[in-house]
Amino acid sequence: MNNIESYILNGSRVWRGHLTKIGGQRLDSPAPFFIRPLNHNDAAAMGKLSNDIYRHLNPGEECFIHQHTPAYYHQVFANPDISYIGIFRGEQLIAMSNLTLCRTPRDFAAEIPASPVNFFDRPGTLIAAFGADCVKPEYRGNSLNLIMTTCRLDLAREKGCTDAASIIDRRNHWNMPPYFSNGFNMFATGIDPADGGKIALMHHDLHRPRPTQPQPGINIPYDRFDIIDRLLEKGYTGREYNRQSSGITFTFSPEYQRRRQALPQMAVWIRTKGVAHV
Ligand SMILES: CC(C)(COP(=O)(O)OP(=O)(O)OC[C@H]1O[C@@H](n2cnc3c(N)ncnc32)[C@H](O)[C@@H]1OP(=O)(O)O)[C@@H](O)C(=O)NCCC(=O)NCCS
């Protein structure tokens, strides 16, 4: 995997790595990229990237990623709880993603709809919700979202978060390795009340070390939604994604099942901010 260096520049954390492929072609010599937090000066580039991503979506993906204008990105930075990071090749923005701090169950329901688990059952909970993941099509194949997810976990820890969470389109197997490889668990599935999309809910307990030994588990193709739903109901948790088999490994570990809320489900996605969530 890409060797990423992290350092502090002008008070902000930045990262540096190398692209090995462009347009699906392997490069003779790796090309450097860097990752930094985005700010309102990047709004025009973010609008352009958003437009590019939207034009290249596969059929059916439109409800998972939203097209936004530079004006939208300008106003996003007025909210101190939302941070974006971007990957640059030279001056060109080639990928971006975000992190939104969720301080209350209401904030969390706005970002991660229909979660059957109330993560605020523990005192001091502060959740980083990850979203808006996108990589310009010609730069895919460099694991850039996996890298951005690792960087966002660094940021989440720096911000004092206890947990990180995200939602993934269940058919989007390209976005599974970035989360599973970074220690996220698939703890539930559902229907996004905003647009009817099939979503998988992912969670990472930032205070809990990952098991070092491989866990015995069952590998299920990612698109066997019915079997996966039944396993999750029975107390299994999705732990790993295998690119060769396109399967998710589930292990029996009912910790999420135990934390399922007795309260009515937080099924209402309160679109307070109109923010794109993935
Ligand atoms: C999800 C996404 C960010 C992953 O991009 P990435 O980090 O560059 O992906 P990877 O480097 O892990 O790609 C691994 C392989 O899958 C391919 N791949 C990745 N995304 C793909 C896509 N949307 N369609 C077809 N192939 C894709 C890559 O070309 C690469 O192939 P290779 O190994 O033959 O070179 C990217 O697909 C994307 O921007 N999608 C549109 C926005 C989106 O769906 N966001 C997530 C919503 S849940």
Image: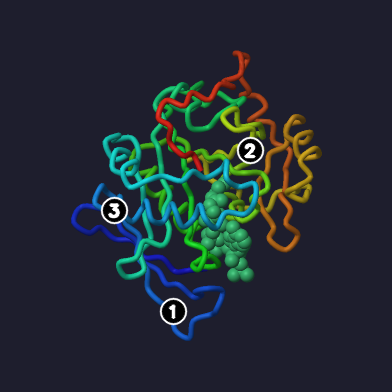
Residue 104: x, y in percent? Answer: 42, 23
User: In the image, what residue type sits under mark 3?
Assistant: Asp
Q: Is residue 88 left or right of residue 140?
A: left
Q: Residue furthest top?
A: 263
Where is 38 relative to 162, above or below?
below
Q: CA distance from mark 1 to mark 3?
A: 25 Å
* Nearer to us in this view, 116 or 193: 193
* Nearer to us in this view, 215 or 83: 83
Residue 257: x, y in percent? Answer: 67, 27
Label 2: element kind: strand
Q: Can residue 178 be seen here?
A: no
Label 1: element kind: strand
User: In the image, what residue type sits under mark 2?
Assistant: Ile
Q: Quadrant of ligand 1?
A: bottom right
Q: CA distance from mark 1 to mark 2?
A: 35 Å
Q: Is residue 220 left or right of residue 186?
A: right
- Which mark, by number, is residue 270? none
Label 3: element kind: helix
User: In the image, what residue type sits under mark 1?
Assistant: Pro
* Nearer to us in this view, 134 or 148: 134
Q: Which residue is mark 3?
A: 42
For the rendered model, the colour scheme is rainbow
Bin the neighbour count of mark 2 within 10 Å (Cα to Cα): few under 14, some 14-19, many 20 and up. Answer: many
Which residue is painted at 37% across and 46% down in the image?
A: 69
Q: Which residue is mark 2?
A: 199
